Image: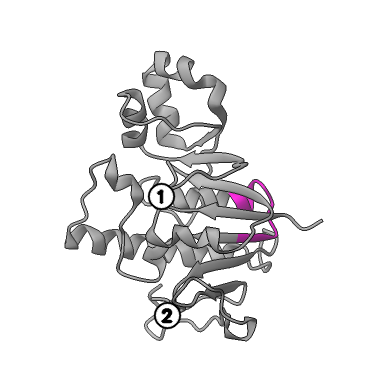
């Protein structure tokens, strides 16, 4: 039976998750912008997120899948680890070879990669990944974690994050060591800032959130940029 995973990110477009019934396993990133019923687990990758929970500023309910930096934080803060050990489903420290470091591999990257590599998803739906489409790095986590959203930092993050997305998509196109995964990105438009392979579908929505007819869905066609820069 095909396995479908829904990954709810923290960008403005996360609300599109509510526009239709969503059957399948659900993953959230950090603290989602709204409650998600029946969530499998919440993925977290940052020191700052751990400190914010440890300081009592927020509470993240349910099970957790934690990356390398939260694992290190737990090792340095055993009391915090003991307090939340019952919530930790697993530490997932896999870093694909095309990710330079854990800093560049953000929570959304980890959640989607985990769904593909560990959960062996056949289809992954992505909501709230606005920085893939627009120069928009707003996140609901900005309400409780101070983040540098200055122009230079936005540019650096965008230039690091978008190439990683393309590499993840290509890594699971069925032509290499991994199974083929169909990635369905939900957004208000389909004007991506980079080329995508043919295992990526963009599902766009009308002004009132209605899903446009299937013939208006855009499926990726891989055409490498002339300059070779991804």
Colour scheme in the image?
Answer: one colour
Element assignment for label 2:
loop
For the question of whether residue 219 can be seen, the reply is no
Q: Can you tell which mark lies on residue 173?
A: none
Residue depicted at x 34% and y 53%: 139
Residue 123 on the magenta span: yes
Which residue occupies the foreground of this view, 65 or 7?
A: 7
Q: Residue at x 35, y 49 (%)?
A: 140
Stretch of the chain drawn in magenta? 115-124
Residue at disc 1, secondary structure: loop
* 166 or 214, nearer to the observer: 214
The residue beneath circle 1 is: 106
Q: Residue 141: horizontal and vertical position, in percent?
A: 33, 45
Q: Residue at x 53, y 73 (%)?
A: 210
Where, quadrant-wise, is the N terminus in this rendering? bottom right
Q: Nearer the viewer, residue 45 or 128?
A: 128
- How many numbered discs sit on the rendered protein? 2
Categorize mark 1 by other alpha carbons within 10 Å: few (<14), some (14-19), many (20+): some
User: Which residue is denoted by mark 2 in the rendering?
Assistant: 191
- Residue 41: image quadrant is top right
Query: Which residue is located at x 40 percent, y 86 percent?
Result: 226
Residue 1 vertical placement versus 229 (above, below): above
Instruction: Say if the magenta span includes residue 7.
Output: no
Q: Position of residue 212 (x, y in %)?
A: 56, 79
Q: Which-is-in-front pick, marks 2 and 1?
A: 2
Q: Give the farthest residue toward the front.
A: 208
- Across and down, in percent, residue 145 comes to 27, 40
């Amino acid at each position: 039976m095909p396995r479908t995973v829904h990954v709810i990110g923290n960008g403005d477009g996360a609300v599109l998750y509510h526009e239709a019934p969503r059957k399948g396993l659900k993953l959230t990133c950090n603290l989602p912008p709204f409650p998600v019923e029946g969530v499998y687990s919440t993925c977290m990758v940052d020191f700052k997120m751990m400190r914010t929970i440890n300081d009592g500023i927020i509470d993240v309910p349910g099970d957790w899948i934690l990356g390398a930096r939260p694992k290190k934080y737990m090792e340095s803060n055993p009391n915090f680890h003991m307090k939340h050990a019952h919530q930790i489903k697993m530490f997932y420290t896999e870093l694909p070879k095309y990710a330079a470091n854990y800093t560049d591999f953000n929570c959304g990257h980890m959640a989607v990669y985990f769904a593909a590599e560990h959960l062996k998803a056949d289809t992954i739906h992505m909501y709230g990944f606005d920085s893939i489409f627009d120069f928009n790095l707003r996140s609901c986590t900005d309400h409780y974690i101070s983040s540098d959203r200055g122009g230079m930092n936005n540019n650096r993050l965008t230039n690091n994050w978008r190439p990683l997305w393309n590499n993840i998509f290509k890594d699971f196109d069925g032509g290499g060591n991994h199974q083929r995964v169909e990635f369905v990105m939900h957004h208000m438009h389909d004007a991506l800032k980079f080329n995508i392979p043919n295992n990526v579908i963009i599902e766009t929505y009308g002004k009132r959130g209605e899903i446009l007819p299937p013939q208006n869905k855009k499926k990726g066609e891989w055409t490498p940029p002339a300059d070779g820069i991804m």
